[in-house]
Amino acid sequence: MKMIGALGVVIGCGAMLLGGCQSKGGPSYDIAITMDDRIGANTEVLVAMVGLSDIEYTKDVAAGEYDGEKLKAKLGDDGASEDWVYSHPDEGRSRTLLRGDDVWNDWRQDANWVMVMARIGVGRYDRIGLPLDKNKWGGREIQIEVAPEGLDLKTKQVVN
């Protein structure tokens, strides 16, 4: 998959649909990333996203691919190997991956999850896996705030 974006904040996301495969033209969302007010103007943040199939998500999460040193390594190259990258302060206090962005064309092929990864300041790393099932989210926008403690998912999943 190709990388879209560049610089300081890298969000690495992997996308997976619960309960089966997602077909072409499946759901896509605006994924809005904003900085918490406590993130200083000079604090470097890297957010990267990557799309993942159900199998990739299950295997990679179980293997710890998005934890500890492995997460640090994924973000160590400023997210160059990820699908979508955002950098603070270089790109401002917020950025949205729009549902019409080209990266969704790749993700709709077989991605059922988006893995959002972040490096916050010097030593804080975090990640959130977002299911792309159309029944998991109430609207068309998923909001994530980058706080000093880590990523904070502001949009709540729909309980079925």
Image (spheres, helix red, strand yellow):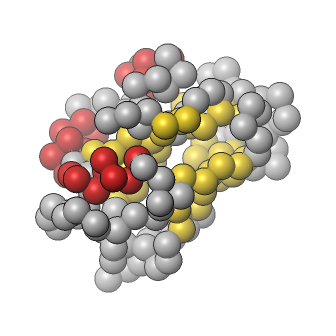
In terms of image quadrants, where is residue 7? top right
Q: Residue at x 40, y 25 (%)?
A: 81
Q: Is residue 57 left or right of residue 137?
A: left
Q: Quadrant of the N terminus?
A: top left
Q: Residue at the right extreme?
A: 41
Q: Residue at x 42, y 49 (%)?
A: 102
Q: Is residue 22 above or below residue 89?
A: below
Q: Is residue 19 left or right of residue 145?
A: left
Residue 12 seen in the current view: no
- Total of numbered circles in the picture? 0
Observer-nearest of 127 and 41: 41
In terms of image quadrants, where is residue 26? bottom left
Residue 123, image x and y in percent?
A: 62, 22
Residue 74 seen in the current view: yes
Residue 140, image x and y in percent?
A: 49, 72
Q: Is residue 75 above or below residue 118?
A: above
Q: Residue at x 69, y 45 (%)?
A: 147
Residue 57, image x and y in percent?
A: 25, 45
Q: Residue at the bottom extreme?
A: 160
Q: Is residue 11 above or below residue 138?
A: above
Residue 136, image x and y in percent?
A: 37, 72
Q: Quadrant of the C terminus?
A: bottom left
Q: Is residue 59 above or below residue 103?
A: above
Observer-nearest of 124 and 10: 10
Q: Is residue 49 left or right of residue 122?
A: left
